[in-house]
Image: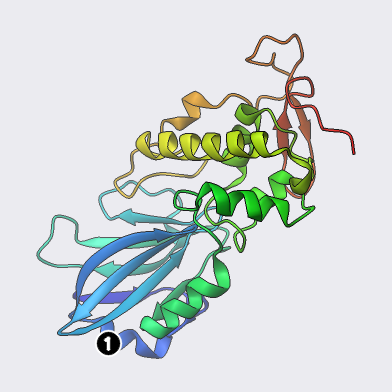
Amino acid sequence: MRDCWVGRGDIVREGLPSLEWYRQTTITGVERRGKSVILTFRCGEEARFLAAELGMTGLLLFRSTPTKYPQHIHFVLHLEDCAEPEIRYWNPRRFGRLSLLDQAGLDQYTARRFGYDPLTISSDQFLRMLGATRTRLKSLLMHQQVIAGIGNIYANEILFRAKLHPDQAANKVREGLVTRLYEVMRDVLHEAIVMGGSSVRDYFAPDGTEGQYKRRHLVYAKAGQPCPNACGTVIRRSVGERSSFFCPTCQRRARP
């Protein structure tokens, strides 16, 4: 990385005084942790990290990607000797932040923000996690400190396919249904990754391509439409902290 530009100082949550170290370093890794993207930078034997929280509207985009409302670009990495000269952090609602971290800082960042990863958690761990709480299923799936990386779209789609009501208490789900939920969760997420995610509003890949998983949505944003299971019921929307879309027939809430 040749240089970097900071448009808003408050967009960097921690580590801003260390910014000078990142100049003239090499990006050697990119990974996901929860809803954050972690870039690894190296200079000699030392490694440090940039954690980009995407939140609801954050994106990492290449310069070649057409960008709506460029005033919402708050941080730019200027690169050299590569196909793309810039990586831009774009976030109109600024729910996410950037953090510049050493290894100890990254370990702390991960520990305090993220629970199990839904793609690596074991079935036994998933069973114990649900059995230990009365939290509503949808809220639990979206609780990043419990299980990290599932947003509102995928929580709705997972629960519909698993035939579980979003307000069902987690510890009241029978073991066989927990196993089904576990398998459906992994299937939905793997399929969504292969299809590039869901571009329903602001989401794009760094090169500007749209995610195509929205074509597979069965219930999200489909209130009033017939249930795709052809059960004769229409999809209902309940408005709480985040909107839930579900079929009241296929996703019956178990009685206490």
Q: Which residue lies furthest to the left in this view?
A: 81
In the shown orientation, is residue 193 left or right of residue 27?
A: right
* Placement of 227 over or under 188, stated as above or below: above
Q: What is the three-letter code of the residue carrying label 1? A: Trp
Looking at this view, is 2 or 190 the one in front? Answer: 190
Horizontal and vertical percent position of residue 255 = 88, 34
Horizontal and vertical percent position of residue 34 = 49, 58
Horizontal and vertical percent position of residue 174 = 72, 37
* Placement of 196 over or under 116, stated as above or below: above
What residue is rendered at 44% in x and 36% in y? 192
The answer to whether one can see residue 84 in this image is yes
What residue is rendered at 63% in x and 15% in y? 228
What residue is rendered at 25% in x and 62% in y? 86
Looking at this view, is 80 or 231 the one in front? Answer: 231
Residue that badge 1 annotates: 21
Q: In which quarter of the image is residue 5?
A: bottom left
In the shown orientation, is residue 181 left or right of residue 244?
A: left
* Placement of 202 over or under 70, stated as above or below: above
Q: Is mark 1 on a helix, strand or loop?
A: helix
Quadrant containing the N terminus is: bottom left
